[in-house]
Image (tube, coloured by chain):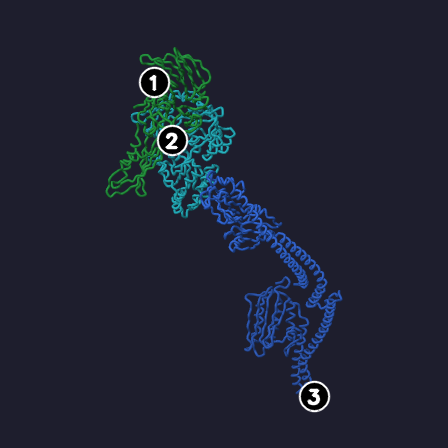
Chain colours: A cyan, B green, C blue
């Protein structure tokens, strides 16, 4: 994978590889509660939960027959996990479903033990990891014996590894799906779990300039041409499959109005990861759109006025996802009643301009099925026929 | 059952009214972002507008945009009320039904609880007062005495496969047990006695089926002309009689069987995930123009279906009850109704 | 400046001047020759550039045509290809720029700026370009600025699209020009970029003014640029504007290094300097030798003349040559010989004159008392003859007169004797002011109403080493002379003043004054302008002044009086 994880500790607040952590950490460290595909909290290591009469203390009943990776039973005192908390249950469950709330036991040798379907057999920070199946996993041993992970691997190299058989799974750009499918690889994808957005890093950029830039961008063409219609053009942070209301944030282009607002705007420095082909193509197109409205975006490599970034959606719960985005963007999460109000407050003032939602995609060899649900991934020993 | 879309639309309309002055009359524009059909959308719109209808003197028209959207949790009804440049927004979530298409009159799915236990059940076979239960511990033989089932024997045949499957086939007193990678043959009566060999229609070490003409798949069902296969990509593939793939659709899970009984002959009982807190549901489908058409109302089950096997006159569904966390075996029958 | 120096300078200047003239003429002639060659070569370079541009244009058109007729264009126009598909085509044909366009010039795919799809191409393409075979220059907008390129446009084989391809005007183009050694071509590309065959140009700012001139005028211009502090780094440039459709695309600069020319000029200059320097040195040596031969006798003559002026009339000059200088030396010697002889004769004559004058003065002085003596004795003789009583009276009167006149004679003889044997002075400390005051007191009685005294003494004391008596005597003589010079009255002005290492005493009258000849002969003993007197007064003054190692001068003008000034030193040896 591209991301290079500094640590596998769920408590680590490294925001640089959130998507990869969201995929891998739950395979090793489980939480009391986890979100299902509808974003609803479901039992995981806790089978049920009750509160005291005053609703200030919650008791989560621990699942029985759960073994840690060293074979020792996980048995919290009294068979339950108690916590004093007077917040609404929804908020408590949301927090408990976060990787940071995973059940982690530190062994005597300092290694971390979890309860998930895989355990860490080898860890070299930012370089490689080997997860092996946890034979005593309470929901049944996974099909896979082991997962070898090479970190910090550029996409091009991942594709070459896939073609040469060195790997079974490679991350791919959304624009490479068609090409790789034609080569005979299976393509797995998530729903839209990435949001490409422009983020203003310089607070002194005038409001009018920010709005002008937002109005100048042709999202439809970016999605249709550059992204081969793999994405969903949007001015919302959360994709519609998650929030349902993304269409409420207007994404229409208005070049005439943008020109008015941008009259005598100073040039802005513009940065994006030029190693990322998608960001590069989108960034270049945004520069062209902006130029049409009279805004000059000058490429920069260091701190800049505005930056094109890919923001990960790491939860099926809207508020949890917005919390994660606020953490990444280093802004405070506005106190608001619901996800729509929270998202509206975050997007107010055009300091963040969402552009398009994209899925994560992988190309897998014909031997792999059920990717990316790691616990369910099956690997054919013999190469099977995959219909293109 | 939860709130229907029409109910939700009516509640939305009431919320919308709060934003309108007595002299204001809404002009509603509807947008549908879901897969709902035109007729359903019309019904929802009608329900919305009915509540908003009012006779107003010296009316002022206010634009209201009503959007039917959806998200992970279900449907999301959104109303935008525009006063000049100002916009007010009301939202309401409505859980999704498995299908809001009206079922044809008459056909229903009848389910009957046969057995429940804590260990995962793989298959259940009933013969008169005897019952064989194949679970992860082995084959248990039960005899009904005084209305209760007593275990009278067990043959250990542990399976440590994740999401294990197993199949019982009874023919007279002989018994064939299919486990992943292993087939055991013997008798069940008077006691269970089996000899096991390698080889099975269930793929060794996993949860798929494998037959001579089909690679690993989750389920298969044959109708008169078609073969439906739940394949590894999560979709249901449709093959014609010559074996050519003619379609592939999503929406069903990995468990479906062909029913050969009465009005359900050559039709498919399929388990589908339902949206909401409850478990799966099973409905009867026909495949018309290579696409599934639901024929019955779905029968809700208290949890996800872990196995669905065809049996004479119906099917057997194994369900993991999310509330009790116990495994339940249901017989599924199609009531062709009136 | 000596004659020798002047002669040397003249010689040197003559040599240097001649050499400089020749050097300058050669340098100018050389420069003109170089310039003519440069012009020819630059024109050749410009022609070559134009031909190369045409050739490249044809090659470019061929490549664009290949792309236009390829299947890839069909894919691109049909939307089957990715939006940046043009990049592969451009790479295959080695084009720097490629736009696939709809007929209305909307970009379908761009190789050099892929993100511009959907926007209009702005290369200034005109409909006639699609049919034309010739390429043209165009300004290509890029994300980082503009570039100038040679561009060609063709219609795709399906007729649904235009293919516009281009190649930069770059260093490769310049490298391909066969340029003579010492020359180079630079290309300024709009809006602001200067390259040569190797790429970027260092110190490009030095060409800014020439480029600006070409841009402003729209015509060729020339300039010379000196790249470093050395003149030999200079380069002469001709700037040629490259216009296309009324827009300036660039400026071609043909440069010729002036190093060889400068080197040659330097060489000529150095040769000139060396030759000139050598000439000057030789001239100096020659001049020195010449002047040595010429000026030495002249110097000898000058030395001899100085000796003569100093009083040594016996000075002689050696005669070493037989030319004009030798003749001059001989004449000098003869002249001094004559001068000596004349001086001797003059001295003798003066001596005779002085003796004659002394005799005259003696005769005159003695005659006065002698005549009464003779008369008295004759009276006595007569009186004895007459009566004894008359003889007694006459004898008494007569002896009285005889004694008086004898005393007078004695005085006269004494005065002459005094002058003959004036004693050596006895030096002691004498205050000049006191001495003058004392001396003038003696004469207060003799100053009558007609002569007024103006005494102007220096402040304080004026002590010197002197013989007070002699000095008093000298002063008295001067005062008496001054009074004698004003028989009708006037002003007697006596003054003292301190001078450097001495004192000055001046005695001035307002009498009739003296002529220059009288001034000259004033201090000659027995010379007097007075009708009486021995004429020794001033001689005594001069003798006293001389014994005191001083100086006496007289200034006078007839009718305006005379002023005698005595200057005496403070010390006589170690005495004060």
Q: Is residue C414 visible?
A: no
Q: Which mark is residue C385?
A: 3
- Residue of label 2: A316
Which residue occupies the foreground of this view, A254 or C321?
Answer: A254
For the residues tagged 1 and 3, is the chain the same?
A: no
**In the picture provided, is B71 more to the left or to the right than A270?**
left
Q: Is residue A132 visible?
A: yes
For the residues tagged 2 and 1, is the chain the same?
A: no
Question: Label 2 marks which chain's residue?
Answer: A
Residue A375 image position (x, y, % from top left): 43, 25
- Residue of label 1: B114
User: What element does badge 3 sit on?
Assistant: helix
User: What element does badge 2 sit on?
Assistant: loop
Question: Label 3 marks which chain's residue?
Answer: C
Which residue occupies the foreground of this view, A206 or A195?
Answer: A195
Question: In the rendered picture of this protein, how many numbered marks are placed on residues?
Answer: 3
Question: Label 1 marks which chain's residue?
Answer: B
Q: Local crowd at mark 2 within 10 Å, few (<14), some, or many (≥20)? A: many
């Amino acid at each position: 994978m591209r991301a290079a994880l500094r640590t596998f500790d769920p408590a680590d607040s490294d925001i640089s590889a959130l998507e990869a952590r969201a995929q891998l950490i739950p395979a090793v460290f489980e939480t009391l509660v986890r979100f299902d595909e509808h974003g609803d909290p479901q039992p995981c290591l806790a089978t049920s939960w009750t509160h005291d009469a005053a609703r200030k203390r919650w008791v989560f009943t621990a699942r029985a027959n759960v073994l840690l990776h060293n074979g020792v039973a996980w048995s919290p005192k009294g068979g339950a996990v108690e916590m004093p908390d007077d917040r609404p249950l929804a908020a408590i469950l949301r927090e408990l479903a976060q990787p940071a709330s995973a059940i982690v036991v530190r062994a005597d040798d300092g290694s971390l033990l979890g309860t998930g379907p895989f355990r860490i057999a080898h860890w070299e920070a930012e370089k490689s990891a080997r997860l092996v199946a946890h034979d005593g996993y309470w929901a049944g041993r996974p099909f896979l014996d082991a997962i070898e992970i090479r970190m910090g691997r550029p996409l091009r190299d991942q594709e070459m590894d896939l073609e040469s058989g060195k790997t079974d799974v490679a991350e791919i750009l959304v624009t490479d799906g068609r090409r790789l499918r034609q080569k005979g690889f299976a393509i797995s994808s998530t729903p839209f779990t990435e949001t490409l957005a422009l983020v203003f890093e310089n607070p002194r950029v005038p409001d009018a300039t920010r709005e002008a830039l937002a109005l100048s961008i042709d999202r439809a063409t970016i999605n249709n041409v550059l992204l081969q219609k793999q994405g969903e053009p949007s001015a919302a942070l959360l994709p519609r499959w998650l929030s349902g209301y993304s269409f409420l944030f207007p994404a229409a282009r208005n070049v005439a109005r943008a020109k008015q607002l941008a009259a005598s705007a100073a040039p802005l420095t513009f940065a994006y990861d030029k190693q990322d082909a998608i960001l590069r193509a989108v960034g270049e197109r945004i520069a062209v759109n902006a130029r049409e409205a009279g805004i000059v975006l000058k490429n920069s490599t260091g701190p800049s006025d505005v930056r094109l970034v890919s923001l990960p959606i790491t939860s099926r719960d809207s508020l949890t996802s917005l919390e994660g985005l606020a953490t990444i963007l280093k802004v405070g999460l506005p106190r608001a009643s619901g996800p729509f109000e929270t998202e509206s407050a975050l997007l107010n003032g055009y300091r963040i301009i969402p552009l398009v939602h994209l899925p994560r995609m992988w190309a897998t060899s014909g031997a792999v099925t059920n990717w990316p649900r790691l616990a369910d991934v099956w690997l054919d020993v013999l190469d099977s026929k995959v219909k293109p | 059952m939860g709130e229907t879309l029409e109910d939700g639309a009516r509640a939305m309309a009431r919320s919308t009214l709060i934003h309108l002055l007595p002299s204001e009359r809404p002009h509603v524009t509807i947008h549908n972002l879901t897969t709902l059909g035109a007729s359903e959308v019309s019904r929802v719109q009608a329900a919305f507008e009915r509540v908003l209808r009012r006779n107003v003197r010296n009316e002022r028209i206010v634009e209201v945009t009503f959007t039917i959207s959806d998200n992970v949790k279900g449907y999301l009804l959104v109303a935008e009320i525009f006063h000049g440049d100002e916009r007010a927004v009301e939202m309401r979530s409505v859980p999704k039904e498995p299908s809001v298409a009206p079922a044809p009159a008459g056909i229903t799915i009848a389910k009957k609880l046969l057995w429940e236990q804590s260990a995962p059940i793989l298959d259940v076979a009933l013969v008169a007062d005897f019952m064989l239960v194949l679970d992860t511990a082995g084959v248990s033989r039960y005899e009904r005495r005084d209305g209760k089932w007593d275990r009278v024997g067990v043959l250990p045949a542990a399976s440590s496969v994740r999401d294990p499957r197993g199949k019982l086939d009874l023919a007279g007193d002989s018994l064939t047990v299919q486990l992943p990678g292993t087939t055991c043959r013997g008798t069940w009566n008077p006691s269970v006695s089996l000899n096991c060999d390698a080889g099975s229609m269930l793929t060794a070490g996993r949860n798929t089926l494998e037959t001579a003409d089909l690679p690993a798949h989750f389920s298969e069902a044959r109708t008169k002309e078609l073969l439906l296969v739940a394949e590894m990509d999560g979709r249901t593939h449709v093959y014609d009689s010559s074996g050519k793939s003619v379609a592939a659709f999503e929406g069903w899970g990995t468990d479906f069987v062909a029913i050969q009984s009465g009005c359900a002959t050559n039709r498919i009982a399929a388990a589908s995930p339902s949206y909401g807190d409850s478990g799966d549901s099973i409905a009867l489908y026909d495949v018309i123009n290579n696409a599934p058409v639901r024929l019955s109302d779905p029968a809700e089950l208290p949890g996800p279906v872990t196995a669905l096997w065809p049996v004479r006159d119906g099917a057997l569904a194994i369900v993991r009850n999310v509330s009790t966390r116990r495994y339940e075996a249901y017989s599924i029958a199609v009531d062709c109704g009136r | 400046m000596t004659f020798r120096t002047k002669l040397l300078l003249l010689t040197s200047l003559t040599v240097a001047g001649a050499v400089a003239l020749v050097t300058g003429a050669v340098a100018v002639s050389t420069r003109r020759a170089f310039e003519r060659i440069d012009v020819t070569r630059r024109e050749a370079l410009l022609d070559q550039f134009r031909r190369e541009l045409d050739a490249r244009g044809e090659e470019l058109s061929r490549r664009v045509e290949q792309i236009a007729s390829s299947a890839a264009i069909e894919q691109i126009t049909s939307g089957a290809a990715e939006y940046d598909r043009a990049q592969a085509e451009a790479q295959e044909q080695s084009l720097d720029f490629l736009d696939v366009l709809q007929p209305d010039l909307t970009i379908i795919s761009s190789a050099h700026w892929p993100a511009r799809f959907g926007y209009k191409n702005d290369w200034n393409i005109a409909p006639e370009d699609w049919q034309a075979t010739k390429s043209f220059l165009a300004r290509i907008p890029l994300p980082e600025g503009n570039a100038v390129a040679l561009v060609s446009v063709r219609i795709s084989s399906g007729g649904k699209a235009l293919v516009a391809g281009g190649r930069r005007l770059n260093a490769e183009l310049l490298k391909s020009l066969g340029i003579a050694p010492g020359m180079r071509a630079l290309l300024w590309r709009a809006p602001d970029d200067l390259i040569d065959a190797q790429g970027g140009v260092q110190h490009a700012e030095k060409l800014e003014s020439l480029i600006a001139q070409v841009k402003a005028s729209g015509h060729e211009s020339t300039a010379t640029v000196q790249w470093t502090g050395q003149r030999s780094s200079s380069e002469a440039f001709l700037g040629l504007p490259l216009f296309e459709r009324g827009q300036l695309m660039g400026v071609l600069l043909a440069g010729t290094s002036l190093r060889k020319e400068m080197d040659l000029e330097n060489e000529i200059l150095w040769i000139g300097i060396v030759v000139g320097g050598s000439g000057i040195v030789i001239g100096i040596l020659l001049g020195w030798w010449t002047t040595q031969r010429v000026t030495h006798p002249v110097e000898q003559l000058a030395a001899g003349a100085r000796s003569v002026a100093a009083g040594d009339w016996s000075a002689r000059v050696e005669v070493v040559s037989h030319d004009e200088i030798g003749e001059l030396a001989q004449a000098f010697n003869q002249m001094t010989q004559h001068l000596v002889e004349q001086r001797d004769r003059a001295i003798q004559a003066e001596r005779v004159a002085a003796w004659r004058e002394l005799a005259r003065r003696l005769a005159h002085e003695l005659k006065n008392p002698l005549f009464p003596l003779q008369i008295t004795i004759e009276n006595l003789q007569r009186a004895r003859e007459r009566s004894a009583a008359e003889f007694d009276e006459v004898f008494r009167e007569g002896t009285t007169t005889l004694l008086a006149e004898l005393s007078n004679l004695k005085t006269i003889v004494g005065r002459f004797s005094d002058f003959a044997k004036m004693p050596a002075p006895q030096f002691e400390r004498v205050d000049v002011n006191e001495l003058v005051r004392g001396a003038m007191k003696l004469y207060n009685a003799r100053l009558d109403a007609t002569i007024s005294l103006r005494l102007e003494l220096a402040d304080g004391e004026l002590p010197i080493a002197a013989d007070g008596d002699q000095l008093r005597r000298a002063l008295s003589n001067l005062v008496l002379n001054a009074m004698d010079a004003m028989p009708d009255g006037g002003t007697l002005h006596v003054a003292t003043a301190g001078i450097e290492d001495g004192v000055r005493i001046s005695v001035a009258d307002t009498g009739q004054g003296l002529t220059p000849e009288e001034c000259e002969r004033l201090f000659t003993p027995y010379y007097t302008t007075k009708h009486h007197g021995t004429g020794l007064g001033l001689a005594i003054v001069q003798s006293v002044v001389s014994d005191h190692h001083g100086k006496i001068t007289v200034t006078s003008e007839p009718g305006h009086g005379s002023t005698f000034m005595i200057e005496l030193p403070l010390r006589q040896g170690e005495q004060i």
